[in-house]
Image (tube, grey):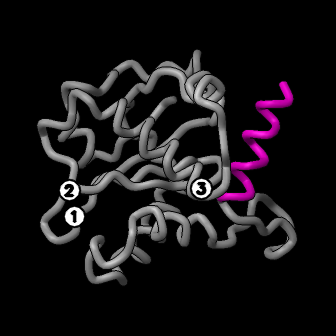
Amino acid sequence: MHIHLSKKLEKLLKKFTDKKSSELDSSRLGKWNATVFYVDRKKCLFFLNAQTTYSFILVNVMAKDYPNLHKKIKEELYEQLSYDGILLGPDFYSELIGGIRFLPTDADRRALGFINYKLDIINHFLSIESISVDLLCHRLNSDFFNTGPGPRYQNMTTPIEEMKRVVEEIQGD
């Protein structure tokens, strides 16, 4: 799983960022983008799949968590997928995610636009603690978006449905 970090997040995870961004062994789920934001002085990490716009959040991340961040990411993504009704067996999930690599920013304008849009929605909530993080992410993943060119409303789907489609394609292989 390749995660392209924002400049701010890259500064925080300097030691753990792989400077060589070779795309030779990309993840089966495609690339991910991540950024950092703060709610009530708590550091939160926001992750977005560039292909499906599926997202999840890690809340209250501290510097002591950085060495185990790979494990926390895998656990939170699994929990969010399950919450959204995308049920995967542990073996298939491990194969699907593979190893996690942190890469420098790729300046993907489409992904950055979706991240900014979803962070703006999050900012409308007074604090992360006022709503369950899983429920918040579920709501973010239930927003419609256009998957391709053509008439504006012809290719509308949700990130949950798009992620289900991608996972089903991979399972069919």
Q: Point out which mark residue 43 bears.
A: 2
Residue wearing tag 3: 53
The earlier-in-sequence mark between 1 and 3 is 1
In the picture, measured across the screen, residue 43 lies left or right of residue 45, that is left
Q: Are marks 2 and 1 in contact (CB under 8 Å)?
A: yes
Look at 66% across and 55% down and name the residue there: 85
Which contiguous range is marked in magenta? 160-173
The crowd level at tag 1 (other Cα within 10 Å; few <14, some 14-19, many 20+) is: some
Q: For numbered disc 3, what is the local secondary structure?
A: loop
Nearest the viewer among 104 and 76 is 76
CA–CA distance between discs 1 and 3? 21 Å
**What secondary structure predominates along the stretch shown in magenta?**
helix
Residue wearing tag 1: 38
The crowd level at tag 2 (other Cα within 10 Å; few <14, some 14-19, many 20+) is: some
The earlier-in-sequence mark between 3 and 2 is 2
Residue 115: % across, % down: 46, 61
Residue 170 lies in magenta, yes or no? yes
Residue 39: % across, % down: 22, 69
Q: Are marks 3 and 2 in contact (CB under 8 Å)?
A: no
Disc 3 marks a residue whose amino acid type is Thr
In the image, residue 137 sits, relative to residue 65, either above or below, namely below
Where is the C terminus found, in terms of image quarters?
top right
CA–CA distance between discs 3 and 2? 22 Å
Look at 34% across and 81% down and name the residue there: 125
